Amino acid sequence: MHLSLTNKKAPLLLLACLAQAGLAAAQERPAVRDSVHPLTEVIVTANKFEEKSRYVAQKVEVIHAPEIRASLSNNTGSLLEQSGKVFVQRSQLGGGSPVLRGFEASRILLVVDGVRMNNAIYRTGHLQNVITIDDDITEMVEIIYGPASTIYGSDALGGVIHFRTKSPQFSKTSTHLSARYSSAFREYTGHADVNVGGRKFASLTSFSYSDIGDLRMGAHRNSDDGEWGKRKQFISQVNGVDSILTNPDDRIQRHSAYRQYDLLQKFRWQPREGGEHLLNLQYSTSSDIPRYDRLTDVRNGKLRWAEWYYGPQDRLMASWQYKTTRLSGFFDQLLAGASYQAVEESRMQRAYRNTQREHRVENIHVAAFHLDLRKSKGRHELNAGGDGQLNFLKSSAFRQNIQHGGKTFGLDTRYPDGRNYMHYFGAYAQHLYKIVPGKLILNDGIRVNYTTLHSTFADTSLLHLPFTEASQNHVTYSANLGLIYLPDVQTKLSAGASTGYRAPNIDDIAKVFESAGGTQLVVPNPGLKPEQTINFDLSASRQFGKQLFVELNGFYSIMRNAIVLDRFRFNGKDEMLYNGVLTPVVASQNKAKATIAGFQASLQWQVLEKLRAYGHVTYTHGRYTDGKGVRMPMDHIPPVFGKAGIQYGWRQLETEGYVLFNGWKRAKNYNPNGEDNLVYATEKGMPSWATINLSARYPVMPWLKVQAGLENLLDVHYRVFASGISNPGRNLVLKVQAAF
């Protein structure tokens, strides 16, 4: 099936098709609930198997299907951001890099349907990989805050974001269609999924397509903005020659548009009761995605880059999973799986009036497996298992003359141009003990992990490297201990300590690239060690009757061997000639110590039967001490952020008004050598902001719902901390959903 909504008549044609259908729709739970029961309702899978959240010491948030379907987000990054529970950075419109407790990119773990997305080239900077998960087929997002290495292994320092897509349903045939339009993006998105289910076999097919245009920023600027962020000029070719053109509307962020396609196919087979197989096939690709922040870089008073874009973001995943609740022997339940992923990432850049375009392409193949077992007996629950992930990378590069028939030349690769692999193997045990059933619960666990890495530099002529290969082998350990006290069914008190680790990957050890708007050069450092954290959590939550729920969580993390970018001497020099420019040298290094602390607070209040208020706020503070004893701000630490809103239901109409907000990030709190991107902020840092947003949802027919939203009602100009692109101005969003 091919669904394109770029034609202006497409929404009308879609509505006409919907009007011909007469099948009844499956009813979904309303967004405005009659009461608040977070302690008793939420089931989480933080320990791989389903568990009530009241028995899990770690803080876990869940974005449920009704909230996802009610969202007006245009990709998965926006879905997380609009929840108010996750901070999201952007370097371009086609992106979204989540931050958990001051950790980002390779320091948080992304999981989709039980499969690790993180691979050997996940960088510590900013990542847009999360958008390759289709939010239109996602039915739940589970956010695990704090180290989760005991269960999930490397990278889960700040936490885990686990996306679960819809599963095929037995004995059911259904079709879901949706279309969305957003004015600030000139976005047209279409989605269709079809479920065909028999008694023992079911199939789910899904397709989504998005065409997103250049983004329009807000018009109302505060006193700290000045001309900051305006897109006054852009580069385009005129008669085959790069030309700097005046933008007729400096609020339109020219060269930010992109397109995306997402396919999913699942087969579910239950040969006998209590055991089933699931085959999960996913493919996501896109058009070229312009790196907007780089396209605004200036050198010698002129725009620097004529072209800077990521090639199509290709992600192919095939996974098989088997689970049974009728296991003979010591364990009661089994969850086993194997997966394969093929990811292609590329970046292309060409300087103004330079005929040479640089192409760097990374192809990574990942094979993985896992085996998880559960035993429940009396007051004890034991989860145990093992997993492995094998990463194979091929890095290539070439320089192409855009004239003279596109002749190609050699070019240095982003990663070593020889053989590259990185493998993980681990085993864990997680235990839950009901010391006093219903009152006092103990969580404890341990993991051991082995990591091996090898990279070969076939050509060292560019930087005259003093080595031709980099190899590492590490054995790491992780543990957690948590105690939960439930004085009554309305209250939960918990305290926990946990460790996390992240083994240096190929991106940490061996890459070479120009960073921070061309102001520094990152060089290899094969002597890195795994970074580790020790985290402490205190949480208290309380339900007051059926109307009010309040939760407060405080956390404190100590990092050892923290990997940060800092000034570095390479071959005895602290500056090097790169692309014809003498550039300061930095490298990823293990710093002696870092601390991150903060708190999260949330409130849900059922004011009236159909009126509900809520709010979430997160504050984080992070510092590290370098080898010279100098204390500096950690990068990736967001300012205070959150969301507050009200929901009201009148008959079948669901309405919501909410405020998203970020506090100031002052320039003095930016990391000078990391990925905070002060170059894309004001001289004082990133200004605080708040947006007012409204939405309404109404079932026109039992099978048809329409939704309208007005985001950034006051048309405020703002930019999120560390981002290189301004956020949308006033944005009218229209969405149609149908279920048959």
Image (cartoon, rainbow, N blue to C red):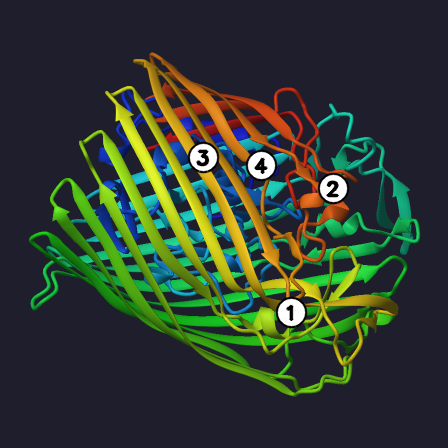
Of labels 2 and 1, earlier in sequence is 1
Of labels 4 and 3, earlier in sequence is 3
Residue at screen point 67% across, 57% down: 674
Determine contact: label 1, label 4, CB under 8 Å: no
Q: Is residue 173 visible?
A: yes
Question: Which residue, given by chain and number where applicable, does mark 2 sit on?
Answer: 681
Residue 556 % position (x, y):
45, 49
Front label number (2 vs 4): 2
Mark 4 burial class by Cα count in 10 Å: few <14, some 14-19, many 20+: many
Front label number (3 vs 2): 2
Question: Which residue, given by chain and number where applicable, does mark 1 sit on?
Answer: 361
| Amino acid type assigned to the residue bearing label 3 in the image | Ser
Of labels 3 and 2, earlier in sequence is 3
Q: Is residue 189 left or right of residue 499?
A: right
Question: Which residue, given by chain and number where applicable, does mark 3 sit on?
Answer: 178
Residue 32 has which mark?
none
Residue 194 % position (x, y):
35, 44
Relative to 615, does residue 103 appear above or below in the rendering?
below
Alpha carbon separation for disc pair 2 and 4: 30 Å
| Amino acid type assigned to the residue bearing label 2 in the image | Ala
Under circle 4, the secondary element is: strand
Of labels 1 and 4, earlier in sequence is 4
Determine contact: label 2, label 1, CB under 8 Å: no
Alpha carbon separation for disc pair 1 and 3: 35 Å
Determine contact: label 4, label 3, CB under 8 Å: no
Residue 299 % position (x, y):
88, 54
Residue 188 has which mark?
4
Front label number (1 vs 3): 1
Q: Is residue 490 left or right of residue 502?
A: left
